[in-house]
């Protein structure tokens, strides 16, 4: 299993988490609160955690293509929703998950 993580420093982490989950829930299985979310994408999964300082996103997938695709879905939507922050891209850091 491959894993990558990104962090967006923002005071609006909870807002973005909820906004992303409400949007994704139209097409995939999502469970969320104001501070934690789990999303089941076709090619991988995403876990998001928000606090007063930011939003942490962890993506897991079985292969590089699934990891890249899941990252791209989350990132493209977050960039759109966080347009006031002038976010261009997330800094994804990859690790091998156990």
Image (spheres, helix red, strand yellow):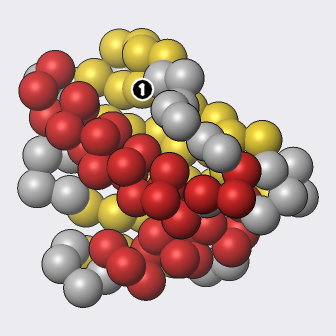
Which quarter of the image is occupied by the N terminus? top left
Examine the rendered structure and indicate whether residue 84 appears above or below residue 72: below
Residue plotted at (87% across, 49% down): 53
Q: Secondary structure at mark 1?
A: strand
Residue 37: tell me if it is visible. no
Residue 16 vs 2, above or below: the answer is below
Q: Is residue 69 above or below residue 36?
A: above
The residue to which callout 1 is attached is 4
Residue 21 placed where, x, y %? 44, 74
The residue under the point 12% across, 46% down is: 43
**Residue at 29% across, 40% down:** 72
Classed neighbour count for the residue bearing mark 1: other residues with Cα under 10 Å, few (<14), some (14–19), many (≥20): many
Question: Which quadrant: the C terminus?
Answer: top left
In the depicted structure, whether residue 59 falls above or below residue 54: above
Q: Could you say where residue 90 lies in the image, as x and y percent from the top left? A: 53, 31
The count of marks equals 1
| Residue located 70% across and 59% down the image | 84
Look at the image and tell me whether residue 82 can be seen: yes
Residue 61 falls left or right of residue 97: left
Locate residue 32, reporting x and y percent: 51, 76
Where is residue 50? Give x, y as percent: 71, 58
State which quadrant residue 33 falls in: bottom right
């Amino acid at each position: 299993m491959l894993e990558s993580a990104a962090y967006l420093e923002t005071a609006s982490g909870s807002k973005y988490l909820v906004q992303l989950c409400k949007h994704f829930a139209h097409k995939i299985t999502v469970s969320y609160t104001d501070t934690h979310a789990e999303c089941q994408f076709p090619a991988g999964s995403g876990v998001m955690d928000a606090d007063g300082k930011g939003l942490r996103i962890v993506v897991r997938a079985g292969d590089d293509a699934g990891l890249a695709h899941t990252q791209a879905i989350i990132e493209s939507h977050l960039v759109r929703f966080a347009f006031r922050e002038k976010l261009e891209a997330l800094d994804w850091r990859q690790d091998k998950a156990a």
